[in-house]
Amino acid sequence: MLLLIFLCCALFFVLLLLFAVRSYPIPLQPQSRILILIAHPDDETMFFSPTICALLQAGHRVFVLCVSNGNFDGLGQIRARELSRAASKLGIAPGDVTCLDYDEFHDGDTWNRNALCQIVMRHVEVLSADTVVSFDSYGVSGHHNHSSCFEALQTAYTNGDVPRDVQIFVLDSIPLWRKYVGMLDALFSFGRSPFFYMARFRDVAACWRAMWAHRSQLVWFRVLFIFFSRYVYMNSLRRISPLPLTPSPRNPQKFKFH
């Protein structure tokens, strides 16, 4: 009986939390074109689904650029197809998903930030994207391929390759103890980052359907992830921009987060 009372109270608290917490979207022009830069197939679902769903529901167009097809175990072609199917479950058109398969960007290898910078900026130009969303310097899980996405964007700023009308936002990495408390992390996340997306019930359901499309990756710990990870329920982001410093070999241009 006590357990039932506890579960009912917990459910009531979670529902209250969902209705109380509000999203603070990133500032965008109407019908913006947003490029989601990820490292591997399934990153878009596991980490960015609240942001993707909110952007699409707001009438923006979302593109996905996946740097590697995740061929570490020889499943690259399968994972690329799964990415397209998963993206469609989130509401992204199949033609708006690009999965690269370059020798320079194999899954798990060290990626050249300058080469990746050129490719990303080329896609920004071709797609007429005005916004890029990607990982921060830690890359959520500490995976160096995730961090390379951030380093490529950082390099673009250093080289002066980012157009003035293009904004770049990065997903906050959080401590491990907060990563798997699901919706309860709203207590610790809300108000800490300037931009925040809280998934609605249908967004969470879309995330679960999308993760099911990544069938080759659906091992037990990823099943647990999609139920307990706070990234399924919320995203907190920050905008990066260069500080007004003159870059030099001894004084590389640094960045501020806001």
Image: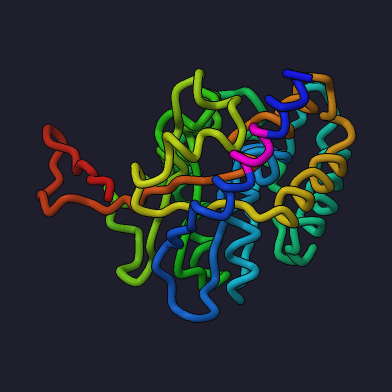
The answer to whether residue 155 is seen in the rendering is: no
Residue 47 versus residue 128: which sits nearer the camera? 47
Q: Can residue 36 be seen in this view?
A: yes
Tell me if 153 is positioned left or right of 64 in this view. Answer: left
The residue positioned 65% from the left and 41% from the top of the image is 12
**In the rendered image of this protein, does residue 102 appear above or below residue 119?**
above
| Rendering coords of residue 252 (x, y %) | 18, 38
Residue at 45% x, 22% y: name it.
175
Please name whichever residue, 29 or 167, is drawn nearer the observer in this view of the structure.
Answer: 29
- Identify whether 61 is placed above or below 67: below
User: Which of 232/72 is in front?
Assistant: 232
On the image, the x and y values in percent for residue 140 come to 51, 30
Q: In which quarter of the image is the N terminus?
A: top right
- Horizontal and vertical percent position of residue 35: 55, 60
Most extreme residue toward the bottom, as rendered?
30
Indicate whether residue 258 is drawn in magenta: no
**Left or right, residue 65 beside residue 254:** right
Q: Residue furthest front?
A: 1
Image side of residue 18 versus residue 72, left or right: left
Residue at (19% x, 43% y) in the render? 253
Residue ID at (50%, 53%): 20
The segment highlighted magenta reads 9-14
Q: Chief secondary structure of the magenta span?
A: helix
Residue 77 spot, x, y in % from top left: 86, 40
